[in-house]
Amino acid sequence: MISSYDQDLHCLYLERSSLHELEKQLKEKMDVLDQQHARISEALRERRSIISPIQRLPSELLCKIFLATLEQTHSDTNPVIRNVASVGNSPWSVSGVSARWRSVALSFQQLWSSVNISITDDNFRDDTYSLCLCLQLNRSQTYPLSMSICVDRTKSTAENLPIQLITILSSSSARIRELSLDLPVILLSKLPALQLSLPLLEILTLLGSSDGDLVGYPRMRLFLFTPNLRSVEMIDIKNPQQNFDFPWNLLKQCKSEHSRGRYWANVSQPHHHLNLLRELKEVEECVLRIGRASADIEFRQNFPLVCSRVRVLELSSWISDYDVFNFVSIFQQDSQAAGTFASTCRLIHRSQPSITVLQFDYGVVLTADLLNLFRSTPTLEDVRITSSDVFTPEVLEELTVDHTSSKDVILPRLRHLFIGGRSFTGTELMGMVWSRWNIGQSHRVERLQTLKLYFRERWYAEAIESFMLEEFEGCVMEGFSFGICCVLP
């Protein structure tokens, strides 16, 4: 019997020891949990201290923050395409964060005014996607719309515009202020039949199709009524003036671009742009991408054109043969005028536009042409000519201001000068800079703020930069900017 009691006591002892071990383990786990609780509490406190000011922001400021977060990513397939919004759901994401954010978002019409429509077979298989778009339009209330319509060519086989999309366009056309269209030709050709009026439309972006051009289609009048259209950007459209019936005479801005990988024969030629410019009576800013040169027979109409309202004219080409730019100076008596820069000078001289910025890269520039241009364009404020050997003593002398003379100042509004050359002396350069920096009370000339020089040889560039920075130290301390922008190849 005693041995039986001893055995029971031993079992109790073992169980007690086991419980003590379990208690120890539980205490260790409790300590770990306490430490985690402390860390999480501290992190929560820190985050609350960050969020707290945001929560106290007035609704008006919160709306501006929401607007800045709208998803506006660029196309990842064509680097030329700009300002074409991708399909995103930022307004929906913002409104789902909290009850207050939802309330603020729903009261902010502008947040819902960027409507991005993606045409795929799945999106318009039923009414789910279109109902979502309608809800967004309802939340935008009366705010002018920025609308983007694109076709995902990997997910769409549509040959007609979806009925739901036609309904949306018909009901919202009066509010569309900006419109981007990335549609295949077969769908684009369906728009005129809708006879949409867009009375508020100001900006139109039109992307050409890589799966078919506009040859064989009649001239399209996409919209019945666009009295406020002021800016058109066309991408990969070879002959826009022939293909589209827009109110060209109303436009203030026009851009015709082409993607770099586009077959060169399908890029706009000079005569295409000239025919377009003939229609742009009021254009002030014009950006043109040029393909191969036009044949002489294409210039059957009277040239040259006079573009008296143009303030910005940007010409560029993916083709290395820069002679394509000679189209800007088509004279009946001198159709073979050599030199891109000379042609540009003639265009500016004939049109007399009030240009403020001139940039010309890596072409041949003759001193006589440059000086004639400077004398005929007193409105220039920013000159950037990266060609080598342009900054000659003759140019320096013309740019040096004699404050004691009553002679007209060349480029009186010049503030920024980027130019290449090395045939001048340090004394000549310093004289020009000082004459345009120390202007005193003179109202005849603006103060030169920036001078950047381009050179061929790196060693020469580094040497003159070190020397000139020392000479211009006083000017630099007062705000003058001088340096070597790059070394020409």
Image: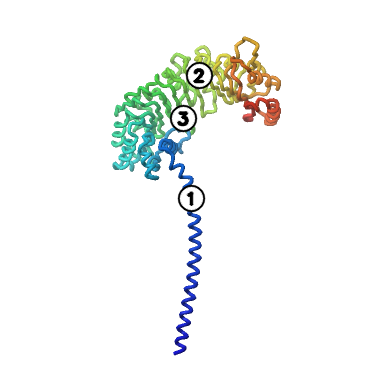
Ranked by sequence position, the earlier of labels 3 and 2 is 3
> In terms of depth relative to the viewer, which is nearer, 8 or 168?
8
Is disc 1 surrounded by few (<14), some (14 to 19) or many (20+) residues within 10 Å? few
Vertical placement of 396 versus 87: above or below?
A: above
* Disc on the earlier residue, 3 or 1: 1
What's the amino acid at mark 3? His
- Nearer-N-terminus badge (2/1): 1
Foreground residue among 151 and 419: 419
Which quarter of the rendered picture does the C terminus lie within? top right
The answer to the question of whether label 3 and label 2 lie on touching residues, with beta carbons closer than 8 A, is no
Image vertical order of residue 369 relative to residue 142, above or below = above
3 vs 1, front mark: 1
Q: Secondary structure at mark 1?
A: helix
Where is residue 238 drawn, in percent x and y? 43, 27
Image quadrant of residue 54?
A: top left
Residue at (39, 39) in percent of width and height:
87
Compute the Cα span from label 3 to label 2: 19 Å
Type of amino acid at the residue the image marks with label 1: Arg
Q: Position of residue 284 (x, y in %)?
A: 46, 20
Q: Which mark is residue 328?
A: 2
Q: Is residue 35 visible?
A: yes
Q: Pointer 3: what residue?
A: 258
Mark linked to residue 347? none
Residue 45 image label: 1
Please, what is the three-letter code of the amino acid marked with disc 2? Val
Identify the residue shown where x is 48% and y is 26%.
289
